[in-house]
Image (cartoon, helix red, strand yellow):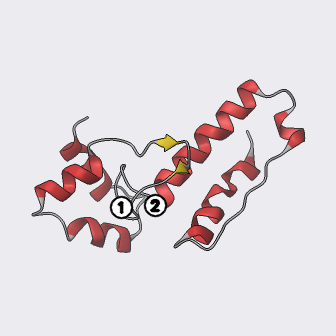
Amino acid sequence: MNYKEQYNQWLNSPALEEEDKKELKSIVDNEEEIQDRFYKDLEFGTAGLRGKIGMGTNRMNIYTVGKSTQGLASYLLQNVENAKDKGVVIAYDCRYKSREFERTARILCQWN
């Protein structure tokens, strides 16, 4: 799927809050911004998941944090013996939206 298709999928997703869609609608005529937000998935690096905050696959938001958290949960369940019994620590710091991202990461508390 190319970046424009990704943008339209997010814009039309029933899972996104109206405020999030409003942000995406505000860039409808800015092809460069749409491309930057959707040309790739935000990557997990040596400092963790870092990037600009905003809507898009290449941005920090509750959707990319949730997707990364689900990936971590799947990895732990498949690769760590007794992962459910060992548990995880979820924390936040003073960075902007850190508390919101911490709440999103609580998906780990719902192991399947």
Q: Is residue 84 left or right of residue 11?
A: right
- Labels 2 & 1 near each other (Cβ < 8 A): yes
Numbered disc 1: secondary structure: loop
The quarter in which the C terminus is drawn is top right
Q: Residue at x 79, y 28 (%)?
A: 80
The three-letter code of the residue at mark 1 reads: Met
Which is more N-terminal, label 1 or label 2? 1
In the displayed structure, would residue 78 be above or below residue 63?
A: above
Q: Residues within 10 Å of mark 2 (few under 14, many from 20)?
A: many
Number of marks in the rendered image: 2
Using the rendered view, name the quadrant where residue 60 is placed.
bottom left
Q: Residue at x 53, y 53 (%)?
A: 65
Where's residue 5, x and y in %? 22, 43
Numbered disc 2: secondary structure: loop
The residue at which mark 1 appears reads as 55
Please state which of residues 110 and 46 is positioned toward the viewer in this rendering.
Answer: 46
Where's residue 17, x and y in %? 41, 68
Q: In this rendering, does residue 12 appear at all? A: no
The quarter in which the N terminus is drawn is top left
Q: Residue at x 42, y 56 (%)?
A: 51
The residue at which mark 2 appears reads as 61
The three-letter code of the residue at mark 2 reads: Asn
Q: CA distance from mark 2 to mark 1?
A: 6 Å
In the displayed structure, would residue 99 be above or below residue 78?
A: below
Q: Is residue 9 left or right of residue 71?
A: left
Where's residue 66, x and y in %? 55, 52
